[in-house]
Image: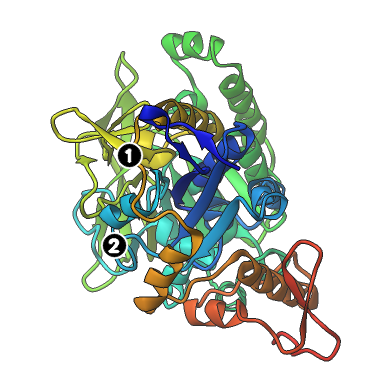
Amino acid sequence: MTRTFAPGGETRGPARIVVVGAGPAGLYAVTELVESGHPVKIDVFERLPSPFGLVRYGVAPDNQKIKSVARVLGAPFTAHPATVRFLGNVSLGRDISRHELRRFYDAVIYAFGAADGRMLDIPGSRLPGSFAANEFVGWYSGHPDAAERSFPLHGRGVAVVGAGNVALDAARVLARSAEEIAATDVPDRVVTALRCSRITDIYLLCRRGPAQMKFTPVELRGLGELSNADLIIDPTELALSESERAELAGRPQVERMVSTLRQWADRPLQGKPRRIHLRFLRSPVAILGDDHVNAVVVERNELTEDGQARGSGQYEVLDVNLVLHAVGYQVRPIAELPYDSGTETLRNRGGRLMDGQGRVLPGEYVTGWAKRGPTGVIGTNRADAAQTVKNLLADLPDLAPPRHDDDRTVIELLEHRGAEVVDWAGWLRLDSHEIQAGRRRGSPRVKTPDLAAMLDRTQPLAHEEPTDDGASTPSPAGRTSG
């Protein structure tokens, strides 16, 4: 198919677009491009051999319903195999540069998310045993970057700092029994580690009050339904000022969650093996220990008239050996890309990348957390991607064509540099292996956490036979997954 979309009326083939990042932001952009009706050919680069980003490596293992969105996100690869191509295990900066992308594609969409977790800047925050929560999330989610990481689960107490869903997820995982964890998709090594856990008390510390909590109802509901842990809430910490009650009147979802917390605060304890202490108006001010975390000093806060927290001068010491800082994410600066240190995003206007002087960089776009910062839920990325794609398509007539205009050239460059590119069929082989391992364990899947093992399991098995969707499956005589 050919069409005219360039100045001067020359005829060119479908617009070649590359999306850097196969998480929700990038894959929603792919969907928007495919459904736009514009003739396009799309390559999706992903630094890991597996797609789905935050859905695979950020959603808690006990929330399989949310993880099911992966089927929707992956649909373009199977429904439009001649249009959309997955190129996994390809890293921007390592395997291909930003400027090379512009030589191969009409337009680039950066959608690589926010990889780094924040840490509280308090005394002792860098002691062994103090971690950004995303490191713990990556570990239990089977992220290859966390494959060799371990966490001190030998102590009785853990402090999880934050009032958002990441903090809730971490607290729930720590509170669950090994049998409950084994029924999820976590790697075997995580099950083994949590089976040996001696944790009894998990302190979930929220800097402000219940009216300012950032939890979503479904995540909060999971906290109150734990079979292995009692939930302890001090009713006095749920008291609201007149201004907070007025604030809640315009936020019915939060109002309902506060009501739920009050009901839970009145529930009698049942003597379960673990306890989650949900504490509001509490901030860690120091982490204690000589060569490892052994306690955290917590200050009681008061709310100012504008809803900000300030210390009251009242302190308590919690006996903990592990501190998880769930206080936000930040976009990691990527060499050569225009980074705004103030917003910690790629500098952009409506998804159009901009240089330091505020000039639009033709043919370069951004979506997702790299565009707006680490806010919103998975579905937020759909509207965000729609805005970016709309602006990209409007710009197409004025974009310079790429120097190389065929599917094979970029693959040849990557292979020349030694990149072991994983295509969609390779991901499906890894996917099949994990599902089969899950059936043996009685869970939805068992994630492969090691990069080398992931790559090995993307390779064709002996005597593979093609399926109708272009993937491959082993014949009865083929190698079995182990």
Q: Pick whichever, 440 or 279, lies toward us.
A: 440
Q: Please, which residue is most extreme toward the left here? A: 357
**Label 2: how many residues lie within 10 Å, few (<14), some (14-19) or many (20+)?**
few
Q: Position of residue 107 (x, y in %)?
A: 39, 42
Q: Pick whichever, 109 or 217, lies toward us.
A: 109
**Which kind of residue does numbered mark 2 sit on?**
Gly
Q: Position of residue 101 (x, y in %)?
A: 34, 54
The quarter of the picture where the N terminus appears is top right
Judging from the image, the colouring scheme is rainbow
Mark found first going from the N terminus, 2 or 1: 2
Q: Residue at x 37, y 64 (%)?
A: 91
**Label 1: how many residues lie within 10 Å, few (<14), some (14-19) or many (20+)?**
some
Name the residue carrying label 1: 400
- Mark 2–mark 1 Cα distance, whole angstroms, equals 23 Å
Above or below, comparing residue 99 to residue 209 in the picture: below
Name the quadrant containing residue 255: top right
Q: Nearer the viewer, mark 2 or mark 1?
A: 1
Residue 356 visible in the snapshot: yes
The quarter of the picture where the C terminus appears is bottom right
Q: Position of residue 253 (x, y in %)?
A: 61, 22
Residue 106 in the figure: left or right of residue 123: right
Residue 170 visible in the snapshot: no
Q: Residue at x 67, y 72 (%)?
A: 446
Q: Position of residue 448 (x, y in %)?
A: 58, 75
Above or below, comparing residue 324 to residue 437 in the picture: above
Name the residue carrying label 2: 93
Q: Pick whichever, 135 or 368, lies toward us.
A: 368
Is disc 2 in contact with disc 1, using a CB cutoff of under 8 Å?
no
